[in-house]
Amino acid sequence: MYHRLTMENLTELKLLRDLYHYKTLGYTYFSDIKKPIITMEREMDLPSCLEELSLTAHQCSLCTLSNSRKQVVFGEGNPDADIMFVGEGPGAVEDETGRPFVGKSGQLLTKIIESTLDVKREDVYIANIVKCRPPLNRVPSKEEAQKCLPFLMKQIELVKPKIIITLGATSYQYLSGDYESAISKIRGEMIQFSHALLMPTFHPSFLLRNPSAKKYVFLDMQKVKALL
Ligand code: SF4
């Protein structure tokens, strides 16, 4: 049995070799987020400007979600936003319009932003873990999320938000790499994430089904507001 050596494999092997070399010199490697090496590499190759990054995403067919999408939903908002919201993936209305969070959940999110944070929706940045709609709104697979994450990581690098608010369990898990913590326990916690703080909270679609949970999101937003 043999493995075909692609350019991607080769770069990965070189990176691993360098890491082992540093280890023998006494360095320890610590990553606060569990990003696969391949994700970090692709991120480095992506354009360092939001417009060009968006164009790249619009031409992307790296995962099978490209087969069923109508539009790529890259993300939108203030390119210098202090706050970035990260959802799971586009739904039907987003797929039609090419804009994130514009359906019923999006309307609730806009209301939350404008009434609790006292800023306009246009003042924040809104994106998703995956840029293409998963069929029937299923949860994106780990593989799809891994393939798409470099776009989001680049968006974070370029926008440089102070606070990243993940919406729902899936978004928190895929971005942080923490698959252990239940969203009901971890929500409202402030976690160091690269140069920003990451705070998980409930997804607006969960709030539409469970209006009594809105009070928790209100408390979470108060924490965010206090940090601005
Ligand atoms: S979901 Fe992301 S990785 Fe998959 S095709 Fe769309 S843009 Fe590319």
Image (tube, rainbow, N blue to C red):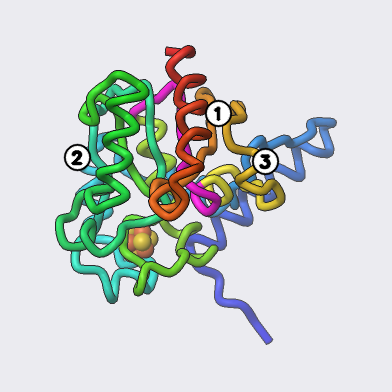
Q: Is residue 56 magenta?
A: no
**Upstream in the sequence, badge 3 or badge 1?**
3
Question: In the visual, does 100 lie left or right of 41?
Answer: left
The residue carrying pointer 2 sits among few (fewer than 14), some (14 to 19) or many (20 or more) residues within 10 Å by Cα, namely few
Q: Quadrant of the C terminus?
A: top left
Whole-percent x, y for residue 215 in the image: 49, 33
Q: Nearer the viewer, residue 225 or 67?
A: 225
70, above or below 174, in the image: below
**Upstream in the sequence, badge 2 or badge 3?**
2
Task: Name the mark nearer the viewer: 3 or 1.
Answer: 3
The stretch in magenta equals: 159-171
Instruction: Indicate the secondary structure of the residue bearing disc 3.
Output: helix
149, above or below 71, in the image: above
The yes-or-no answer for disc 3 within 8 Å of ligand 1 is no
Residue designated by label 2: 51
206, above or below 196, in the image: below
Amino acid type, mark 1: Ser
Q: Quadrant of the N terminus?
A: bottom right
Residue designated by label 1: 194
Whole-percent x, y for residue 118 in the image: 30, 19
Residue designated by label 3: 185
Quarter holding ligand 1: bottom left
